[in-house]
Image (cartoon, rainbow, N blue to C red):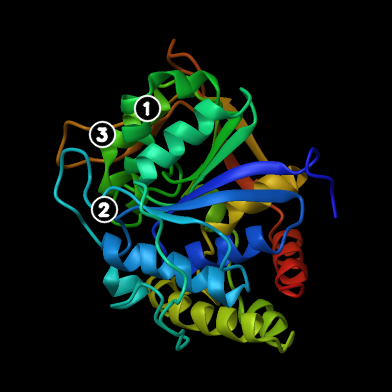
Amino acid sequence: MPSDAARRSIIIDTDPGQDDAVAILLALGSPELDVLGITAVAGNVPLHLTEKNARKICELAGRPDIAVYAGADRPMERDLVTAEHVHGKTGLDGPDLPEPAMKLQDRHAVDFIAETIMSRPAGEVTLCALGPLTNIALALRKEPAIAGRIRELVMMGGGCFEGGNVTPTAEFNIYVDPQAAQLVLRSGIPTTIMPLDCTHKALTSAERTAAIRALGTPVAQATAQLLDFFERFDEEKYGTDGGPLHDPTVIAWLLKPELFSGRTVNVEVETGSELTMGMTVVDWWRVTEREPNALFVRDIDADGFFKLLTERLAVL
């Protein structure tokens, strides 16, 4: 196991969601990562479910020691949009996971994010954003100095060549709170984006899910059940063998960045037009004078990604 000094300190901000759950499991199965805490935000399902789901996944992984904090229960300026039609009424439909015994922390997620980053050496904490960016935007408003102290923000969200998945132009995480996304992308935090352009190349094929199920452990069985439920929606929508496994790409980037390729460009978020609300406007061809603000990842070695995921799930 890597020494504490060599491990990468991360906060996972999330709205579980089956793919969020798999991302959390990947992080907890990776000794290179030190999960300082998990912060829940409203998104795929309302906050009272996302914080509970985060605790369920920690217990599934045998890690009830992980601190889970509840954060924003709605976007900064808009009504909450959820995605039960994709994730089921609990957000984790598929396996029958027990009610969590571990307690929710009393501290608000936004306070935890801001205070943790301010209390640790600059450049130490990486933020892993798997849902809408409300908690992170609110932490920036509360303590603007965190922007210069974060090592990196790695986020799943947006799209360019793939368009959107909740409207013709908008990806779900950005669409739920476009104002938060715009604030975060303009903050100066070093940012890596895992958009639909990348995640739609990471499909949970029958063969890949079978390899996870074949591990035979309770974690692997639950993961396969999560994927079986989650992929049904996108298989029907896109006509593919399997669905895109979005959020675990964030964790995989920290573990094996060589699996990915992209380009550092300017990314802005549409916040004014209802027609294109939440669209990520990506200057891929650098046709504007706008300053690059994010590494926008377009490609993934999908076989390498699923090999990594399966290997790490095996240790839980």
Residue 236 placed where, x, y %?
39, 78
Q: Residues within 10 Å of mark 1 (few under 14, many from 20)?
A: many
Element under disc 3: helix
- Who is closer to the viewer here, 238 or 267? 267
Judging by the rendered image, the residue that carries numbered circle 3 is 179
Residue under label 2, please give it: 167
> At 28% from the left edge and 48% from the top edge, which residue is drawn?
72
Residue 45 shown left or right of residue 144 in the figure: left
Q: How many marks?
A: 3
Q: Is residue 280 above or below residue 43?
A: above
Please, what is the three-letter code of the amino acid marked with disc 1?
Answer: Leu
Element type where label 2 sits in the image: loop
Task: Where is residue 44? Give x, y as percent.
Answer: 33, 62
Q: Is residue 190 above or below residue 177?
A: above
Between residues 274 and 45, which one lies in front from this camera angle?
A: 45
Tell me if residue 43 comes above or below residue 224 in the rendering.
Answer: above
Task: Give the CA distance from mark 3 to mark 2.
Answer: 17 Å
Left or right of residue 44, residue 95 in this image: right
Q: Is residue 211 left or right of residue 228?
A: right
Query: Which element is circle 1 on?
Result: helix
Instruction: Looking at the image, tell me whether mark 3 or mark 2 is earlier in sequence order.
Output: 2
Residues at marks 1 and 2, CA–CA distance in whole angstroms: 28 Å
- Is label 1 or label 2 in front? 1
Q: Is residue 216 visible?
A: yes
Quadrant where the N terminus lies?
bottom right
For marks 3 and 1 on the same chain, the one whose residue lies earlier in the sequence: 1
Identify which residue is drawn at 32% across, 27% down: 142
Ranked by sequence position, the earlier of labels 1 and 2 is 1
Q: Residues within 10 Å of mark 2 (few under 14, many from 20)?
A: some
> For residue 217, which quarter of the picture?
bottom right
